[in-house]
Amino acid sequence: MPIKVELADRLKSLPPYLFARIDEMKEEALSKGVDLIDISIGDPDLPTPAHIVDAMKKAVEKPEHHRYPSYAGMLSYREAVAQWYERRFNVKLDPAEEVLSLIGSKEGIGHIPLAFINPGDVVLCPSPAYPVYSIGTLFAGGEPYFMPLKEENHFFPDFSSIPGDILKRAKMMFLNYPNNPTSQTASVEFFKEAIEFAVRHNIIICHDNAYSELYFDGKRPISFLEVEGAMDVGVEFHSLSKTYNMTGWRIGFVCGNKEVIAGLGKIKTNIDSGIFQAIQEAAIVALRSDEGILDDIRSIYQERRDILIDGLSSIGLKVNKPDATFYIWAKVPEGYTSESFTIHLLDKAGILGTPGNGFGEPGEGYIRFALTVSAERLKEAVERIKKAL
């Protein structure tokens, strides 16, 4: 007789994971033979640049990479990260103490609350946002407090609206610019305000900067760590996933305040065994790549952005033209909710987007499209949406 298997309370309390539901909708549509245009999830359709793949092929053959890797990551990889940060953002980092390798930035974001959050502590989470900020908080026994990102406030949190009793228990805050899902980018002034707020209330800032290299019209986003005082209050997460089309490789890093880095490092030492060193060696090649490779990737996404923005605007949908990320954050037409419009597009047009409310309640009334199909398919998507409306 089989045993009774019961999930832990921490799993029972979780909301349904957004992207798992998206996958279910996708599989259901494909099983019906729908010619699906999937622009829901931010997974690049472009291949990893060939020179990075070639480096990986050579690295796999090295016997020294077949053993357990370093928990913190190869020093040579962390040095490459530090060199990239100095070259790209003019930020100097100590690769030994201020850089830590991650099995993709999602892993580090999900684990960092375990290092600093006790049951009853509050983590300030933006909303709408990447769900892992709040999920990692819940796994650590913490309480997410959602900071609404409203269009009238240019999709920035209003720190002054956070209640005093919440601030007394707040230990950490997640920020993310360029932002997923709204595509908003941040200014030096905003980061200064966030740093002053963190100092005043003794809060660790965790900035997710995964989209810094996907920018358009030459408008290069800044790093949180560029701003004076940032290293005193927090860390910045980064990933090679979107920058170099390496989502499946699972490699990223976090850098910044060495005490925060050390705390996350203790969690990782006890939970994982590091990143396959061959991947780290290929990532070094990626981080030292010629900027022209990224220019080519950006030009492809910029063409796609312009096609979708112009097309949706011509239909009458309200969209903001993003300066960065490969997402379009569009308002749904009058008479629809985020979910009903997403289902309508799937049923009537064979197009899968992501309902805005899936990123949090303040996302209601929006839908997110990812620029992860060809220009031709995006043109077709516009025509299908036009007919569906």
Image (cartoon, helix red, strand yellow):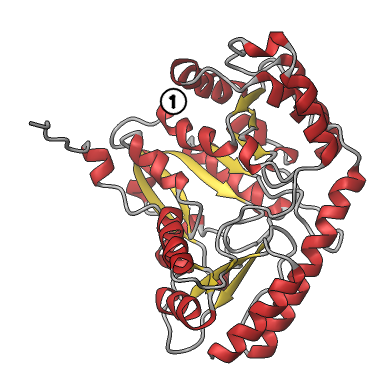
Q: Residue furthest left?
A: 1
Residue 223 occupies quadrant: top right
Q: Position of residue 363 (x, y in %)?
A: 47, 67
- Residue at 40%, 78% in the rendered image: 340
Name the residue tied to disc 1. 115
Is residue 82 at all visible to an observer of this figure? no
Left or right: residue 203 versus residue 229 is left
Count of residue discs:
1
Q: Is residue 237 above or below residue 341?
A: above
Q: Is residue 266 above or below residue 2?
A: above
Left or right: residue 145 versus residue 78 is left
Residue 287 occupies quadrant: top right
Left or right: residue 62 versus residue 129 is right
Q: Position of residue 273 (x, y in %)?
A: 52, 17
Is residue 64 at all visible to an observer of this figure? yes
Using the image as rendered, state which of residue 350 and residue 119 is in the foreground: 350
Q: Position of residue 88 (x, y in %)?
A: 83, 39
- Residue at 75%, 48% in the rendered image: 47
Residue 301 occupies quadrant: bottom right
Image quarter (top left, top right, bottom left or bottom right) of the N terminus = top left
Q: Is residue 161 above or below residue 274?
A: below
Using the image as rendered, state which of residue 30 and residue 130 is in the foreground: 30
Left or right: residue 162 versus residue 279 is left
Image quarter (top left, top right, bottom left or bottom right) of the C terminus = bottom right
- Residue at 44%, 16% in the rendered image: 270
- Residue at 60%, 65% in the rendered image: 39
SS class, disc 1: helix
Q: Is residue 260 above or below residue 127?
A: above
Q: Position of residue 276 (x, y in %)?
A: 63, 21
Using the image as rendered, state which of residue 226 and residue 236 is in the foreground: 236
In the image, what residue type sits under mark 1?
Ala
